Image (cartoon, grey):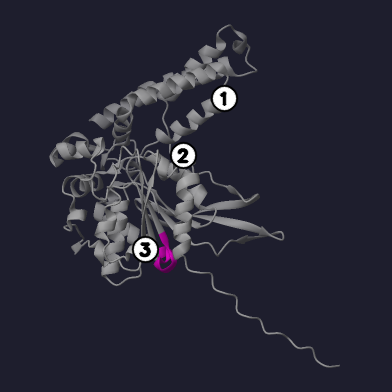
Amino acid sequence: MLYQMHELGRAWMAPMTYWADAGAKMFGASGSWLSTVPGATRVAAGYELLYRIGKDYEKPEFGIHSLEHDGRTYPVIEREMLRKPFCRLLRFKRYADDAGHIAELKDDPPVLVVAPLSGHHATLLRDTVRTLLRDHKVYVTDWIDARMVPASEGGFTLDDYVAYIEEFIRTIGAENLHVISVCQPTVPVLAAVSLMAARGEATPRSLVMMGGPIDTRESPTQVNDLAVHRPLWWFEHNVIHQVPANYPGRGRRVYPGFLQHGGFMAMNPERHAQSHWDFYQHLVAGDLEDAESHRQFYDEYNAVLDMPAEYYLDTIRVVFQQHLLPRGEWKVAGETVDPSKITGTALLTIEGELDDISGQGQTRAAHRLCTGIPSDDQQHLEVEGAGHYGIFSGRRWRTQVYPKVRDFIARYAEPAPASPPQPVKKRRAR
């Protein structure tokens, strides 16, 4: 019922947001006579603030069409490599113009970026992907909003998530692959690679795990406390709702994105309120650059997706309440997840000093589980002054974290095969 009430509220707010958008343009456009009215700037700023608070935020595009690196511009093409009911595997292909002929760069190591399925779209990792493209072939998991998946496709569990990761690794080719998991997927990625290793399958050359809840008993955060202090039945009865009839996934049980978004906002309400007030002040002062930065951030931050109920409840139970992975008691489709079986994969864990979502030590716990990996092939990085988002997006990611990730991957990358010597053709004697 709550989901239906939310949709009704959106429909009720729609005319107001359209009106606010029109008002912002009427009083703010340089060609409008209303922009010359005294106080027009403040009126336009107020209208735009109202519009952005009430509008719907659709899934953004990655929008990575080119890359500037080392003084050159490289065209980039986004391709769908594989489509599953709940996820798309995307490939970003970087090209070089070689003497007037566009050619794909083939020598860079392939990297699979596993984006979190925790409320936001994979486009939250746009900066991560763009930076990695400098030196790598990049693949990304693009999770599909559960409300857009017809109920006839069935459910989606945490076990299914692990199976998706295994299939993506096999599709790309594990032998030369490097996997980067950001936040939530550190757990299913470690499970997928552990199961593949236990079966004797090829595993990725390296794993880079960033700010994830491998063992949430370490430095519990506000997010961890909420999951622990409520029984599983409370989550099932209070935050799980059915998708309304106006979406393809009508009738599907989901954890709605608007509830997750509300939780995000509730963690730092003062900061978000101040950010919106600053946005209004920037508009009034004509500081268009800072105003545009605000728009770009909240266009991404406010765009959320619904999560399948089965997957969400599994994650609460397995990761946050029962801690099955670090206790060695997690079974996926009947197979025990044992990270000690991983032997041929290097491991780098990354944590932010000020991370308020995955506390210090939660990601680093992967090292004590992966006892089969030689100590020389295990590294840990703590990023001073970085919060959760700072380790994979923004200035700290680009200047402090990425160089470490790049060098770590390069250390374990398959060297490019040497070109075979070409036979020298002897001239015939005349």
Pair 2/3: label in front? 3
61 lies left or right of 242:
right
* Front one among 81 and 137: 137
The three-letter code of the residue at mark 2 reads Pro
Q: Say whether disc 3 or disc 1 marks the residue closer to the N-terminus.
A: 1
- Between the residue at mark 3 and the residue at mark 1, the CA separation in whole angstroms equals 47 Å
What kind of residue is marked 1? Leu
The disc placed on residue 60 is 2
Q: CA distance from mark 1 to mark 2?
A: 21 Å
The residue where tag 3 is placed is 377
The percent position of residue 305, horizontal first and vertical second, equals 35, 39
Q: Nearer the viewer, residue 122 or 183?
A: 183
Select label 1 or label 2 by which is in front: 1
Name the residue at 32% across, 56% down: 189
**Mark 2 in CB contact with mark 3 (< 8 angstroms):** no
Is 176 colored magenta in this rendering?
Answer: yes
Q: Tell me, yes or no, whether the two marked residues, 1 and 2, touch with CB atoms within 8 Å.
A: no
Quarter-wise, where is residue 196 in the image? bottom left
Binning the other alpha carbons within 10 Å of mark 1 as few (below 14), some (14 to 19) or many (20 upward) gives: few
Splitting the image into 4 quarters, where does residue 180 fall?
A: bottom left
In percent of width and height, residue 226 lies at: 20, 36
**Mark closer to the chain start, 2 or 3:** 2
The residue that label 1 is drawn on is 288
Q: Which mark is residue 420?
A: none
**Height in image: 419 above or below 286?**
below
Spatial separation of the CA atoms under disc 2 and disc 3: 37 Å
As shown in the figure, which amino acid type bears the numbered disc 3?
A: Asp
Residue 224 image point, x, y percent? 23, 40
Does the CB distance between marks 3 and 1 fall below 8 Å? no
